[in-house]
Image (spheres, rainbow, N blue to C red):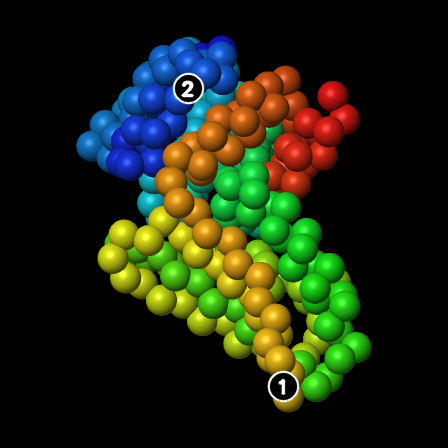
Amino acid sequence: MRLLLIGHGKMGRHVEALASHYGFAVAAIVTEASAPEALAEAGGLVDVAIDFTRPEAVPENLPRLAARGVNVVIGTTGWQAHEEAMRAVAAQAGIGVVAAANFSLGMHLFQMLAEEAGRRFASRPEFGAWIHEIHHAAKKDAPSGTALMLERAMRAAGYAAPMDVAASRAGSVPGTHTIGFDGPAETITLTHTVRDRAVFAHGALEAARWLAGRKGWYGMRDVLVGDEGR
């Protein structure tokens, strides 16, 4: 399969290095300097694109790719204010999209734990809940899309009490997320820590492979469930 890689920073380079392990040949790499001309040229020559660029680039990149019938994996965060419009673009073009705040497969299993914790603690008002995340100093959106995803999961599971969501930016931390519950005499915490940024590239490539031949808007849970069913 032919892959278009959009963005060639740290994550883009990880994707490039791992692509062949997932059956992909990198047909073209689009950098910030080469877009949008390179998108137009490469659009008809690839099977799927992976976008690890900037939040403001997603609403520009996706319509250009959709117009050429290219399925897209969106690995960028912080663009969700445009999600409704991007869903409409994808639906009109009939392409497949996997969009997720976090492409770590372990994180999406962690999300299921967060849902269960939210469900269990929903009826225990003596416990207060929080979410804290820490990322490298260069990450722009705060709280992270993953922290907000965890909050939504806990709310959907029935946890309605106030919940503080906090973020820290320091050094080179790839990403650590903690959910916690504090009672009068005890504290319970669950933590997911990324030790190697390559986990996000592995997840994005797994999603791109899964997306082949599909149409519609998906998340990483769809990818995980699809894998279990095959």
Residue 24's image quarter? top left
Q: Position of residue 148 (x, y in %)?
A: 54, 61
Q: Give the labeled residue for mark 2.
A: 19
Q: Position of residue 97 (x, y in %)?
A: 57, 33
Q: Position of residue 13 (x, y in %)?
A: 30, 29
Pointers 2 and 1 in contact (C-beta within 8 Å): no
Label 1, secondary structure: give it: loop
Left or right: 33 as drawn, with respect to 228: left
Q: Is residue 70 above or below residue 82?
A: above
Q: Give the labeled residue for mark 1.
A: 185
Label 2, secondary structure: give it: helix
Residue occupying the point 59% across, 19% down: 212
| Amino acid bearing label 2 | Ala
Residue 91's image quarter? top right
Quadrant of the rendering where the C terminus is positioned? top right
Q: Is residue 168 above or below residue 201?
A: below
| Amino acid bearing label 1 | Ala
- Residue lying farthest left? 33
Q: Which circle's residue, 2 or 1, is located before the other in the chain? A: 2
Q: Position of residue 207 (x, y in %)?
A: 55, 29
User: Distance from label 2 to label 1 (Cα)?
Assistant: 49 Å
Left or right: 141 as drawn, with respect to 89: left
Left or right: 94 as drawn, with respect to 30: right
Q: Is residue 223 above or below residue 100?
A: above
Characterize the local packing of mark 2: few (<14), some (14-19) or many (20 or more) Cα atoms within 10 angstroms. many
